[in-house]
Amino acid sequence: MTINEEDLVIPDKPLPILKRTGIAREKQCKPRDFDHVAQVDDDTLNRFETVFKKLTA
């Protein structure tokens, strides 16, 4: 699912980003709640781990 910036703009209601994301998902007939844990493939995870190790060395 793709959410564009204009999907998150609610000019009359300054809401937290997760609430705005939920509203945008609802408009797309998706469940309002979503999994907050990113699902990534092994290659992506390995690249992130390499970068993280370099940053914390």
Image: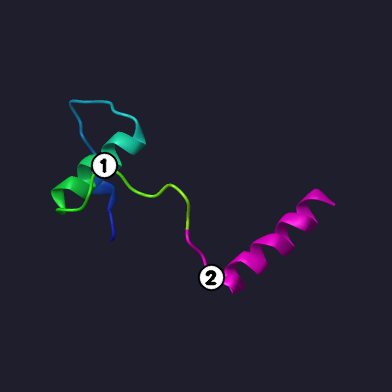
Say which residue appears at 47% left-offset and 56% top-offset.
38
Q: Is residue 54 a member of the stretch shown in magenta?
A: yes
Considering every residue shown, the one lying at the far right of the view is 57
Say which residue appears at 14% left-offset and 48% top-offset.
27
Q: What residue type is labelled 1?
A: Gly
Q: Which amino acid does label 2 sit on?
A: Asp
Between residue 57 and residue 10, name the one nearer to us.
Answer: 57
Q: Residue 55 carries which label?
A: none
Q: Is residue 40 a member of the stretch shown in magenta?
A: yes
Mark 2 and mark 1 lie on one chain; the one further toward the N terminus is 1
Q: Position of residue 30 (x, y in %)?
A: 20, 53
Measured in 3D between alpha carbons, the distance from the residue under mark 2 to the one under mark 1, in whole angstroms, is 25 Å
- The residue labelled by disc 1 is 22
Q: Is residue 48 left or right of residue 2?
A: right
Q: Position of residue 53 (x, y in %)?
A: 78, 57
Q: Position of residue 19 (x, y in %)?
A: 29, 35
